[in-house]
Amino acid sequence: MLKEIKILSDHGKQFVPDLRTQPVSERFRGRPVISADITSAQAVNAAAMCPSGAIDSNSGAIDLGRCSFCNECALAMPGVYRFTNDYRIAASRREDLVIRPGQTDPLRIDENAVRKEVRRLFKRSLKLRQVSAGGDNSCEMELGASGNVNFDMGRYGIEFVASPRHADGVVITGPVSENMAGALEITYDAVPSPRVIILVGTDAISGGLFAGSPALKRDFIENHHIDLYFPGNPAHPLTFINGLMDLMGIRQ
């Protein structure tokens, strides 16, 4: 009996009642904070050690669209860089993913950047077709977890569907390999208008560690309006669901 009780205690509650305020482990790496007193030399050193080129060598700013959340900068410069466990880091504009020194405000989507038809048509229901465009299955697993009994995004009318013809938009993971570029275009074309495009994970947003590879073909990302960006490597289910709730205008 004691063994079973310990297992239940370790697992925690199955159902997360409030996805807006659900606490996560202190070890979780979410929104970073950069000291306003960072020096030029520290910025250069941080940029040199960043494996994904996410840190600007002039200012020391971190581009979450390129960051792999590896924590190397925080380990090397604990007084300059640190990662909070704030998982609400979705953005509706690409430039909002850049965290600058001294910036402590939480990340929230820009309400003015949300298309009016998105709020009007998808406030109560949003059906999405997920496309793994050369992904490594990490973001894909987290997206799958978003619909499980713990997070249950279906309570807000958010679901993944099998056919793009039943979808309101596409969720893209992976850096968009050349072999998947055509399939992505075909999938998007099959979604009825108006439709949304959502990028999940560092690879989808910028190409991640594969940025600049000849194996990628990112024309689709560059030529279409992106409605929502979810940084992370991978993105957490709480990040994903909270961002979609903000996009849809759901307060709770």
Image (cartoon, grey):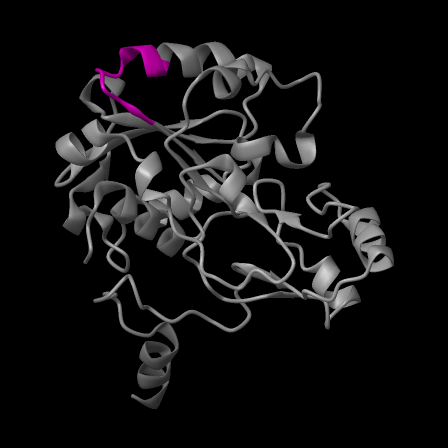
- Residue 88 drawn at (x, y percent): 41, 56
Which image quarter: residue 176?
top right
- The answer to if 193 sits in the magenta stretch is yes
- Residue 59 drawn at (x, y percent): 73, 50
Q: With 231 as the anchor, is 92 left or right in this view?
A: left
- Asked whether 178 or 45 is in front, the reply is 45
Quadrant placement of the C terminus? bottom left
Q: Residue at x 39, y 52 (%)?
A: 108
- Residue 34 drawn at (x, y percent): 65, 62
Quadrant placement of the N terminus? bottom left
Q: Residue at x 41, y 22 (%)?
A: 225
Q: With 209 as the anchor, is 108 left or right in this view?
A: left
Q: With 63 as the anchor, is 145 left or right in this view?
A: left
Number of numbered callouts drawn = 0
- Asked whether 248 or 169 is in front, the reply is 248
Q: With 195 as the anchor, is 239 left or right in this view?
A: right
In the image, is residue 76 above or below residue 185? below
Q: Residue at x 54, y 26 (%)?
A: 134
In the image, is residue 20 above or below residue 203? below
Q: Residue at x 59, y 15 (%)?
A: 217
- The answer to if 210 sits in the magenta stretch is no
The magenta segment is: 187-196
Extreme residue in the bottom direction: 2
- Residue 118 drawn at (x, y percent): 22, 31
In the image, is residue 218 above or below residue 75? above
